[in-house]
Amino acid sequence: MAANWKMNTLPGGAGALVEEYGDEMLCGNPELVVCPPFTHLAALGLTLGAAGCLGAQNCSEHLSGAFTSEISAAMLRDLGCRYVILGHSECRLRNPMESLRIPEKIAQALAHGLTPIYCCGEDLPIRQSGAELDFIARQLADDLPPELKLNSHKLVIAYEPVWAIGTGKHASPEMAQQMHVFIRSRLKDMMGIEAERTRILYGGSVQADNAAGFASQTDIDGVLVGGASLKPADFRAIFGAFAAKGQ
Ligand code: PEP
């Protein structure tokens, strides 16, 4: 499970929010990754400790150098991050060049020991036209770099239909399951048997009252949660649905 705090909370309040999640979530199974804004990473790394899973919301495609305002994968790793979200639709929509940078970003993450949480997903017109499978096949082919063939067990994929993110309109569990099966089959074609072990998360308006439906699907290994991850009671309920799946 991954919590994407987006650009919410202040650094001073991050530790308290994580403590409200509770020990069960922080040390538990399923594995929880907390992805706060960059400014919170150093302090949260200390709160979470060595066992905690810290993730960032993006990284540069460059190793280092004259890239004002950018943050490298090496910097994130040095702060204790183990994961980084890449290709989130909110980044792709804000920056038309973002999608072109995803393969290099994934390669940088892998080179520095970070597990990419790679996001893909179609927008509403594509879903309405029935072209979502072709769209996702193209996105995977364009975004996933050759380095992944050797590291596919380290990849986490988040299927996040753009029309479901922050809208309150989630995909049905069956719709998400169908897409996850498709993504896994594409990964197998692209990378071979290792794709069996790739964790595929669903993201898009996951809430306390719909999480169990997603958890009930065989190929939904977890969820990437935005808004509800800022509400500890709701997030605990979502966590509970996936903890029950693992038993
Ligand atoms: C997200 O930010 O990736 C996300 C899925 O947001 P929300 O849960 O708010 O739809």
Image: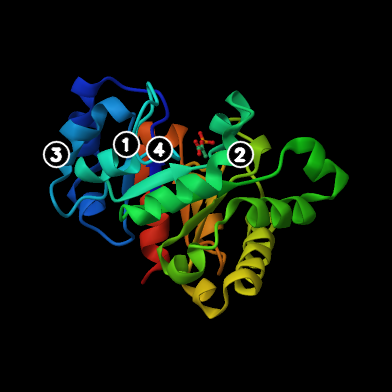
In this rendering, which labeled residue sits more in front, label 2 or label 1?
2
Q: Earlier in the sequence, mark 3 or mark 1?
A: 3
Residue 94 against residue 156 in the figure, above or below: above
Spatial CA span between label 2 and label 1? 32 Å
Q: Which residue is mark 2?
A: 99
In this rendering, which labeled residue sits more in front, label 3 or label 1?
3
Q: Amino acid at mark 3?
A: Thr
In this rendering, which labeled residue sits more in front, label 2 or label 3?
2
Q: Which residue is mark 3?
A: 47
Give SS at disc 1: helix
How many numbered discs?
A: 4
Q: Which label sits on residue 104? A: none
Q: Which residue is mark 4?
A: 59
Q: Amino acid at mark 4?
A: Cys
Q: Nearer the viewer, residue 198 or 25?
A: 198
Residue 84 against residue 43 in the figure, above or below: below
